[in-house]
Amino acid sequence: PVSDERARPHRSEELFARASAVTPGGVNSPVRAFRAVGGTPRFMTQGDGSHITDADGNRYVDLVASWGPMLLGHAHPEVIAAVQAAVSRGTSYGTPTEPEVELAEEIVARTPVDKVRLVSSGTEATMSALRLARGVTGRAKIIKFAGCYHGHVDALLAQAGSGVVTLGLPGTPGVTAATTADTIVLPYNDPAAVTEAFATYGDQIAAVITEASPGNMGVVPPLDNFNGFLADTCRANGALFISDEVMTGFRITRSGYYGIDGVVPDLMTFGKVMGGGFPAAAFGGRADLMAHLAPEGSVYQAGTLSGNPVATTAGLTTLRLATDEVYAKLDETSLTLQRMVATALEKEGVPYLIQAAGNLFSVFFVDNTTNEATIRDFAGANAQVLPRFAAFFHAMLDAGVYLPPSAYEAWFVSAALDDDALAEIEAALPGAARAAAAV
Ligand code: PMP
């Protein structure tokens, strides 16, 4: 479909006005609001396979996939059938159930963790993993990296300042300085900064937490075995290495980025794909560490809806359908897409950089003057021409392709993207590249 055949988003505008009257910014998670790109967020009413449909009846090829969870595409018939069967039996008991055991077994079989505790969001997973690390080590400080997002955990919303070791300042009002005083923020992919932080605070550092391969500043993969270096440095200093695979887990390989670099963390966090579109997440790790959690140990952690039978059924069904063939297809689809984007942008002379970690990739609209061949940290990711992304985004949207509405996000492929969906994207790209070139 071309732009002038598409309905004006009147219904979305109406809904957004109503939403804004009763919800801050009209949305329940900030990046949905289109603040970075301008315009009215589209209210979706339906998803089927590779496409989503908005309240005005416009269809879009979906490259957001609910920010990661919808690995198989929308409304996969087998997932829907399993969920419907689960719902018809009842939705929550506040007792243990079989699906949560099966989901935990599936996660343990796919990843290096011995045990997992199920929670309901990635935020809860990282928050709980930090508490466990502090409880086990009896230490207070944690290291995180600038540009890595681990959910809206108070201690992890600390911003980076300049200098090699920056004691965190609150990244948002409402987070107290005391909360972030124990957060050390370092530049990503910078081993020297990590070495220096451990030299200064070594015996006070409970954990280093990192995205296994960052996707929240755009895709910025670890260079030169950075994860292996972090794991070794933690081990040498009695700290724990926490790998956050909420975004990458069960998405880029059957385990996650672990399937690419093989670095075994002490603790891991998961979310998104393992919930199959429902609120389910997890943290896990070595049995001796997980034994510190209540009721086995003394580190408290709990949840009324943790391991919810409907959510765990959706996640389990999704993971069981995510076979090696699915991951091979996702890799192929991702490469095809990357090539299409590159071709379109090159034709219009738009400077760009595509970075990938497995099938997860993002397109950086770099400055003409940037000669860097690789974006390796948050500072590099910030050197983008944001208005160029906004123009590109809106041209794609008008042509029926839904991209993440921010230049700092990964593009998420799904197994439902078939040749027709890819052809739709290919048809949309030249106009979007022209729009970007015109900025
Ligand atoms: N960690 C990572 C790496 C994430 O990408 C996200 C969400 N984008 C989170 C944690 C937080 O997960 P949730 O939004 O489910 O709280």
Image (cartoon, rainbow, N blue to C red):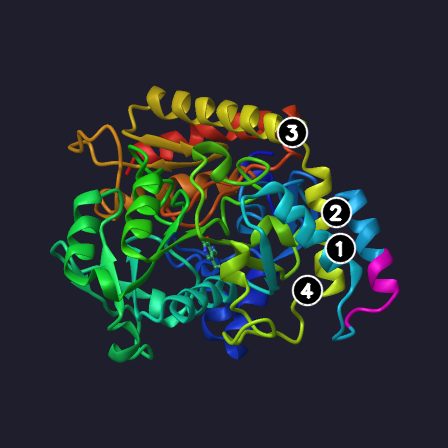
Q: Which of marks 4 and 3 is nearer the N terminus?
A: 4
Q: Does label 1 or label 3 sit earlier along the sequence?
A: 1
Q: Percent x, y for residue 52?
A: 64, 46
Dot 1 corresponds to which residue? 313
* Image quadrant in which you'd find residue 271: bottom right
Determine the residue positioned at 55% across, 49% down. Answer: 113
* Residue 89 left/right relative to 16: right
Task: Give the distance between the C-alpha atoms of the residues marked 2 and 4, in whole angstroms.
Answer: 14 Å
Residue at figure coordinates x 52%, y 76% from the top left: 300
Q: What stretch is highlighted in magenta?
A: 85-92
The CA span between labels 3 and 2 is 15 Å
Evaluate if marks 3 and 2 touch, with contact meaning CB atoms under 8 Å apart: no
Residue behind mark 2 = 317
Q: Do the residues labelled 4 and 3 touch (CB within 8 Å)?
A: no
What is the distance, in whole Å, between disc 1 and disc 4 at their CAs?
A: 9 Å
| Residue placed under numbered mark 4 in the picture | 307
Determine contact: label 1, label 2, CB under 8 Å: yes
Q: Do the residues labelled 1 and 3 touch (CB within 8 Å)?
A: no
Q: Quadrant of residue 321?
A: top right
Local SS, label 2: helix
Tag nearer the camera, 2 or 4: 4
Neighbourhood count class around disc 4 (C-alpha, 10 Å): few under 14, some 14–19, many 20 upward: many
